[in-house]
Image (cartoon, helix red, strand yellow):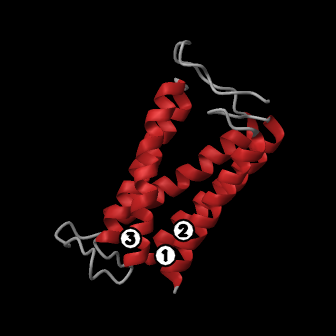
Amino acid sequence: MGQSAVTPTQGFTFGAWGFWGWAETVIKLVAVVIGVIAFLGIASAAPFVIGGNPELGAVILLGLLTIISVVVIFGRLAAREIVSIAFAIASAIGHIALWIALARVTTQPELVILFAVFIILGNLAKARFLTVSGYTEMGQDTAGMLRFNWGLIAIYGLLAIMIVI
């Protein structure tokens, strides 16, 4: 088994993420910024449209991904790694912002696509990070973490496709 997450009995720490770990973080932070830009670009008076939303499937899928991004914060808090905690909070903010924009029928669907693309690119960097570092967490082996990561890549790809068609 490779490098594992910080154990909860230790204090808060900074992990040694290496090039690919930082590349993942920076690339995904671009997605966060895109989510916030989408949110800022909607009219504050625009109503939420869920049932009659032309992008209903994408709204639901992004809603599920948003819930997951919020839940991840608690796992990162348990691991007590400062960069992971900060990034998890930023990621949740980006997901929430984009979901609100999409639920208010954003006039900039290309931002949803760009968000998904940058998350995918970040997860490709994560796949490389997992491969070269041997990093594991929550009892998974590297192969399991890679399978989960590839699943996320597929789901965010589906999100982008849902917006395109």
C-alpha span from label 2 to label 3: 16 Å
Q: Is mark 2 on a helix, strand or loop?
A: helix
Residue at the disc numbered 1: 110
Disc nearer the start of the sequence (1/3): 3
Characterize the local packing of mark 3: few (<14), some (14-19) or many (20 or more) Cα atoms within 10 angstroms. Answer: many
Amino acid marked by disc 3 = Val
Q: Can residue 63 be seen in this view?
A: yes
Amino acid marked by disc 1 = Glu
Residue extending furthest toward the left: 45
Proximity of marks 2 and 1: CB atoms separated by less than 8 Å: yes
Residue at the disc numbered 3: 59
Residue at the disc numbered 2: 114
| Residue 111 higher or lower than 6, as above or below | below
Position of 91 with respect to 27 (left or right) is: left
- Residue at 69% x, 27% y is 4
Select label 1 or label 3 by which is in front. 3
Most foreground residue, 52 or 24 = 52
Name the mark on residue 22.
Answer: none
Amino acid marked by disc 2 = Leu
Most foreground residue, 94 or 68 = 68
